[in-house]
Image: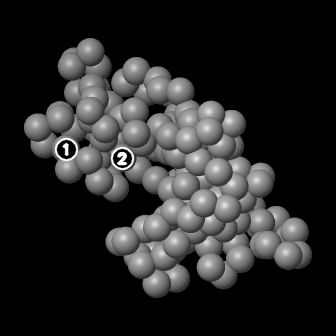
């Protein structure tokens, strides 16, 4: 596996940043491509721009990676899955202290930001919160 990692230096992923505007139902389709530099766990910052065996499972929760993908594939868990499992409830508030923004869990399994945009992708909601703060 280590040799295969050396052969792939950059992975391309897509982040679905689509959202629905609360109240109007308007759907805005938006996607962004992101490049991740493959690195060893010792050199990885586990932040935007790098990926290793340790952080690959968490990046897969929100990003879709092209093949070949040199890491074990992880099962994606959505907000709707968390609602169904009883881990969160509709109306719960999720705070992001990094951006001083609180999102509300919606019945459709989304996260509604204070401006009324509802994202089904938590990372997209966090990026949007950061851009608006």
**Which residue appears at 13% of the width and 42% of the height?**
43
Q: Say whether residue 10 is left or right of residue 130.
A: left
**Which residue appears at 35% of the width and 41% of the height?**
10
Q: Horizontal and vertical percent for residue 78?
A: 61, 41
Q: How many neighbours does mark 1 have within 10 angstroms: few (below 14), some (14-19), or many (20 or more)?
A: some
Q: Label 2: state its secondary structure.
A: strand
Q: Horizontal and vertical percent for residue 97?
A: 37, 71
Residue 84 vertical placement versus 46 (above, below): above
Q: To which quarter of the image does residue 38 belong?
A: top left
Q: Which residue is mark 1?
A: 44
Q: Which residue is mark 2?
A: 36
Q: Nearer the viewer, residue 24 or 52?
A: 24
Query: Does residue 43 appear anywhere in the picture?
Result: yes
Residue 29 is marked as none
Disc 1 or disc 2, which is closer to the eye?
1
Q: Horizontal and vertical percent for residue 50?
A: 29, 47
Q: How many neighbours does mark 2 have within 10 angstroms: few (below 14), some (14-19), or many (20 or more)?
A: some
Disc 1/disc 2 C-alpha distance (Å): 11 Å
Q: Quadrant of the N terminus?
A: top left
Q: Say whether residue 25 is left or right of residue 11.
A: right
**Which residue appears at 36% of the width and 46% of the height?**
36
Residue 44 vertical placement versus 73 (above, below): below
Q: Label 1: state its secondary structure.
A: loop
Q: How is the image coloured?
A: one colour
Q: Horizontal and vertical percent for residue 37?
A: 30, 45
Q: To which quarter of the image does residue 39 belong?
A: top left
For this orientation, the residue located farthest to the left is 42
Q: To which quarter of the image does residue 76 belong?
A: top right
Q: Nearer the viewer, residue 34 or 93?
A: 93
Going from N to C along the chain, the mark reached first, 1 or 2, is 2
């Amino acid at each position: 596996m280590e040799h295969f990692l050396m052969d792939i230096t950059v992975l391309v992923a897509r982040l679905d940043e689509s959202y629905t505007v609360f109240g109007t139902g308007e759907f805005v389709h938006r996607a962004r491509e992101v490049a991740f530099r493959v690195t060893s766990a010792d050199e990885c910052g586990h932040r935007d721009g790098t990926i290793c065996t340790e952080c690959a499972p968490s990046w897969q929760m929100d990003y879709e990676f092209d093949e070949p993908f040199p890491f074990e594939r992880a099962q994606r868990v959505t907000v709707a899955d968390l609602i169904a499992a009883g881990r969160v409830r509709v109306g719960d508030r999720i705070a992001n202290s990094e951006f001083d923004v609180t999102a509300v869990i919606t019945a459709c399994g989304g996260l509604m930001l204070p401006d009324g945009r509802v994202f089904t992708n938590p990372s997209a909601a966090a990026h949007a919160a950061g851009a608006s703060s």
